[in-house]
Image (cartoon, rainbow, N blue to C red):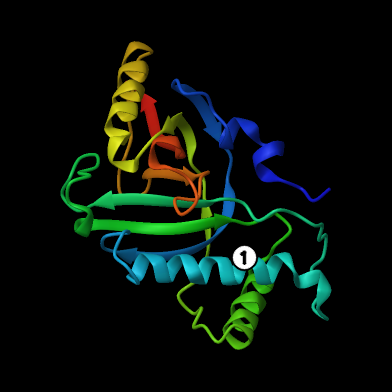
Amino acid sequence: MPFDFKKEFKEFYLPKSKPEIITVPRANYIAVRGKGDPNEEGGSYQQAVGVLYAVAYTLKMSYKTDYKIEGFFEYVVPPLEGFWWQDGIDGVNYSDKSSFNWISVIRLPDFITEKDFKWAVETATKKKKLDCSSAEFLTVDEGLCVQIMHIGSYDDEPASVMLMDDYIKELGYENDINQVRLHHEIYLSDPRKTESEKWKTVIRHPIKKV
């Protein structure tokens, strides 16, 4: 059976629908940065997602090519994730999606090196005839966070965020969102195939002791 991040690391991908505090270890990602409304048809966000999956699947299927990755084992491509922020706004203003800055990411297995990543970007660009040069190898060390499983539309996330805020306040923590530590979402549902009221999204915020 291929290694599945969601099953092997349930504490990071399958939290409960109530807040919990966790420490997230350092991880490597394929990342594409951008700005603007993620719902824009054919916009920069959707293009970025295309690049991410092109590189991700090139790495996943590398064992069928002449390029061999040291320590490789078969795995399921992890879910799409995103780090989000808006200039001059504390938190997230969901009514103004055009002002979103984002880093769209897919997690990489630890055995993938920057050399392997560069090979995948070049190979995906050639084979899929898609410019993947916007992809970067990104390392994120999230550390201490609060997270929750949000069920429903993305526009309804403020209710779940409020639950997290109340929870950490009771325990003597506060949000530590800044230019480095960002609002983080992990998308476990395909919006094209699932009704919005059933979408599952992990919402994660960095925190610190008051």
Please state which amino acid type lies under the numbered disc 1.
Ala
Q: In this view, does 41 lie to the left or right of 90?
A: right
Work out whether 157 lies above or below 96: above
Q: What residue is shown at x 67% (from left), y 73% (from top)?
A: 115
Q: Between 180 and 182, which is closer to the camera in this rendering?
A: 182
**Quarter of the rendering containing residue 107:** bottom right
Rendered location of residue 79, percent (x, y): 56, 50
Rendered location of residue 153, percent (x, y): 35, 40
Q: Is residue 30 left or right of residue 146?
A: right
Q: Mark 1 points at which residue?
A: 56
Rendered location of residue 25, percent (x, y): 58, 40
Work out whether 188 lies above or below 135: above
Of helix, strand and loop, which one carries label 1? helix
Whether residue 173 is visible, yes or no, is no
Which quadrant is home to the C terminus?
Answer: top left
Q: What residue is shown at x 31% (from left), y 59% (from top)?
A: 39
Q: How many labels does the image show?
A: 1
Q: In this view, does 37 lie to the left or right of 164?
A: left
Q: Is residue 142 left or right of residue 113?
A: left
How many residues crowd around disc 1 within 10 Å: few (fewer than 14), some, or many (20 or more)?
many
Q: Between 142 and 106, which is closer to the camera in this rendering?
A: 106
Work out whether 33 lies above or below 201: below
Rendered location of residue 40, percent (x, y): 29, 64
Q: What residue is shown at x 59% (from left), y 49% (from top)?
A: 27
Whether residue 7 is visible, yes or no, is yes
Q: What residue is shown at x 77% (from left), y 48% (from top)?
A: 3
